[in-house]
Amino acid sequence: MTIPLLQLKNIRHAYGEQVVVHDLSFVLEKGSIGCLLGLSGCGKTTALRCIAGFESISSGEILLNGICVSSADFCVPPEKRRVGMVFQDYALFPHLNVAANVGFGLHRLSRLDRDRRVEELLHVIHLTDAGHKYPHELSGGQQQRVALARALAPRPELLLLDEPFSNLDVSLREQLSMEVREILKNQGITSILVTHDQTEAFAMADVIGVMHEGEIQQWDTAFNLYHCPANRFVADFIGQGVFLPGKVINSQQVEIELGVLNGRIPRQCHKGCDQCDQDCMVEVLLRPDDIVHDDASPLLATIIHKAFRGAEILYTLCLASGAKVLALVPSHHNHLIGEKIGIRLEADHVVAFAPSKE
């Protein structure tokens, strides 16, 4: 049986009486890129600092390669964990050039070995000719790559990235996230990214933990978070969508205003109900890609808002009942606000929850 590189077992961390991380557990396999995704204040950065050894835990365990490095009464110092970290503000030394920054943590190597490792990493991050430059002479994206190379230089077992792209503009953020993923995968580095940006998380990570109030709501792939959310919070948080009231026909079908959806109805969609029965009322999640524009459809909806997104337009549509849905339509279908357009339902599975109490 393969031992995971990182395991968190029911860890807890509090500042005084305020619990920031509560009963947090997950497993990250060697070579994988994980992500803790959530809004500010959800505990994701604190969890990262606990993994690094910068913060202690009051209960639970953190294991690296099957060896405990943190518990309620034990904590291996950060410098002895073989964990690298890339900070939000890069934290480059302004008085050192790029080569010296990258090689800063290699003081135990001979001068020759240190120079070889620096040269190797400058090639990896595509800054071979920038070793003599200083941080202020580099762009934000280049500075971030140097910070990454410096963290990789000592060959850490685990790399932690704390909001690494938050200081960059959107287009550069998307480009760099793909570049960094490629570097980490090519180097075989196990990593954990912390971010509030879903696009960044989806582009970088193999597995993502959605955090809320110090707990992981779902630890899963991006596809499953979007299409198979574990609870109402994840469904609301990930991507875009709306909930429409639905009535369960049987264990495989639910009827909504737009038609009948086929698929397995989740168990316990109602509190206290261990199986879905006929006429059970649920709320069904519809994503923008579940609604298809179709001029031949007799089902009409009125456009009440539109957001141009280049190749696509996101329409907000009002149904006959007054309920609103979203539809992502190719932008050559450019309709006016107030216009009625034909739509049809094209969803191949059901995501349903008990009706909201709000």
Image: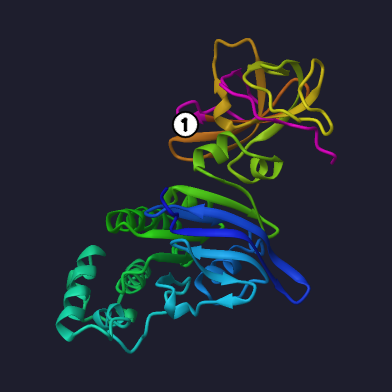
Q: Position of residue 4 (x, y in %)?
A: 45, 54
Q: Residue at x 43, y 62 (%)?
A: 65
Is 61 drawn above or below residue 259 in the view shown?
Answer: below
Q: Residue at x 44, y 64 (%)?
A: 168
* Residue highlighted by disc 1: 331
Quarter of the figure that contains the C terminus: top right
Per the picture, the main secondary structure of the magenta-coloured stretch is: loop
> Label 1: few (<14), some or many (≥20) within 10 Å?
some
Residue lying at the far bottom of the rendered structure:
95
Q: Which residues are magenta?
A: 329-358
Q: Amino acid at mark 1?
A: Ser
Q: Residue at x 67, y 24 (%)?
A: 302
Is 212 drawn above or below residue 287 in the view shown?
Answer: below
Would residue 335 be counted in the magenta stretch?
yes
Q: Position of residue 86 (x, y in %)?
A: 42, 70
Tell me: 4 left or right of 316.
Answer: left
Compare residues 242 and 295 and report the one nearer the observer.
242
Compare residues 159 and 148 and report the one nearer the observer.
159
Is 212 drawn above or below residue 120 in the view shown?
Answer: above
SS for tag 1?
loop
Q: Position of residue 309 (x, y in %)?
A: 49, 40
Tell me: 206 left or right of 198.
Answer: left
Would residue 190 be counted in the magenta stretch?
no
Q: Position of residue 274 (x, y in %)?
A: 78, 27
Q: Residue at x 32, y 81 (%)?
A: 105
Residue 323 seen by the camera: no
Is 258 drawn above or below residue 60 in the view shown?
Answer: above
Residue 205 seen by the camera: yes
